[in-house]
Image: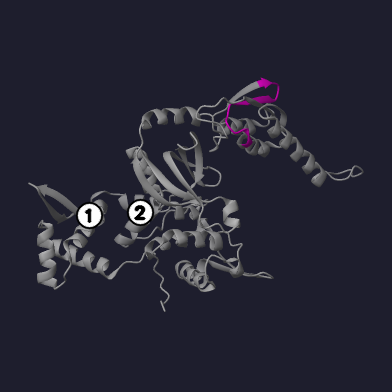
Amino acid sequence: MAGFSELIKNFDKTRDYVRDFFIYGCKVRSDFDRKSIRTYGDEKRRVESWMGDYMRYDDSLRGRSVSISVDSGHIPENPLYNAYYSKSFTDNDIRLHFLLTDILQDGQSRTLKELVDSLNAEYEQLFDEQTVRNKLREYVDEGIIIAEKQGKTLYYSLSRDTADDFVREYKGLDDALRFFSETQHFGIIGNSLLKMLGLTNDIFFIKHNYIIHTLEDILIPDILTAINEKRSISFTSFSDKMKREGDDLGTENKAVPMRILVSVQTGRRYLAAYIPNYRRFSAFRLDNMKALKMEGCYENYDALKDKFERNIRHCFGVSFGMRREAGAVTPMKITFYADEKKEAFIIDRLEREKRCCTLEHTGEHLYTLTADVFDPNEIMHWAKTFIGRIVSIEGGADTVRARFYDDIRRMNSMYGGDEDESVQ
C-alpha cells in the first residue's frame, strides 16, 4: 500500500482541492465525491503541512469545514507558494541533478558521450544517453546549462550566472526581488530567488493581495509563449455549474490566445482568445482552466490580432457578448446626477472609471455616459454602484433595462419600509 507523501505529481489536482475546499471554505468532508475519503484526507494533510498556522476549522451540522484564513496585509509571504515547492521527483532526477552539476563544476565543456562516460567511470552510475540528453535539454531550457555547437557536436557547460553575483553587482536588486516576490504575476519566481539567496521579504506588505491567483501562475508562461510565438493552445475549462455538479471532465477548447486581462476589482485573471470553431472572441477565467497544451502556429495571426484590437475597444469588462468577430453594437446612455460644487469626487470617479465609454456634461448637475459595448450587462453591474444617482437609462438591450428596473422595485419592496413609516 502506497504511503502518504507531501510531494505531488499532478499540480492541477492539488490546485482544484486547494481552491474548492480550502480557499472557498464552504465544503465539508461529505461533499468530497471525486475519489475515496482517504484521498481527501491526504490532500487535507498536504495543505495543512503547507499552510501551518493559516488553517481555520469551523464546525456545523453538516460537518467540519476547513479553510485558509489569511490577512494578506499582515503577512510577508504568500503561503500558497509552498504548493509549488512540493513537486515530486524520481530517483534518477535527483541523482542526475547533483552528478551533472558536480561534473561540470570545473567550468569545462563536455559532449554528451563524455558526460555519460564520466557518470559511469567516476560515479559508477549507468545511464543511457537518451536519459542524460533529456535532462540536459531540460536544464538548457531553464538556463542552468549552456549548449554550444562546435562543428556538428554539442558541448555542454554549467552557466556561471548566479543570483548571488547579480545581487552583489546591482545595488537595490535584493529590494526589487522582495517587492516583486509578492506581486500577482510571477511572484513565485521572486520568492524562489529570495529563498535561494537566503533572504526574506521584511519590507513590503500588500493590503489587497489576491493570493488565490497564485495557483494560476503555472498557466501563464505557456500562454505568454503562445502569444509571443503566435501559436494556438488547447485546454480544459470548467464552469461554476460543472463544479457544483461534480463534472470532472470539463470542456475541451482550442483557442488562439490574444491577451491576459486582469480585473481591477477582484484581481481575477482572464484569457482573451479567439475560438476558431465558433469564429468569435471569448474570455476564460484562468482559475477555471487546466491541462493547457501548446499547439502549432496559427495562420493569419497578425490579421486576427488587428480584429481583436478593434473588438476589445467595445468591451467594458471581459465579455464579448454573443456576437461574432466584429458584430454591431447598440449604443447605451446612462445619465447620472452629481453636484459640481459639492460632489466633485463623483465626477472624478465617473471620469476615472468610464473605460471605453465617453462622459459628457449634459445639463446642470447631469453627466451622461455613452457606452458602445458588446455586453451592456457589464456596464450595469458598475452603474449600480451609483444607485440613487441614476437619472435615466436609454438604448441598450430591452432586457438589460427591464432587469435594472425590476431590481429597483425588488429592493424597494425589501428595504423601502411600510407606507405609514415616517423614517425610511
* Residue 216 as seen in the image, left or right of residue 363: left
The residue tagged 1 is 137
**Quadrant in which the C terminus appears:** top right
Q: Residue at x 16, y 71 (%)?
A: 125
Q: Position of residue 180 (x, y in %)?
A: 39, 50
Q: Position of residue 104 (x, y in %)?
A: 14, 61
Q: Is residue 69 visible?
A: no
Mark 1 falls on what kind of element?
Answer: helix
**Residue furthest toward the right?**
420
Residue 57 among those drawn in magenta:
no
Label 2, label 1: how far apart the Cα atoms are = 21 Å
Dot label at residue 189: 2
Q: Kindly identify the amino acid type of the residue bearing the numbered disc 2.
A: Ile
Q: Residue at x 55, y 37 (%)?
A: 319
Q: Magenta residues, as a range?
A: 362-377
Q: Position of residue 165 (x, y in %)?
A: 22, 54
Q: Position of residue 28 (x, y in %)?
A: 60, 67
Task: Say which quarter of the image contains residue 194.
Answer: bottom left
Between 267 and 35, the residue placed more toward the observer is: 35
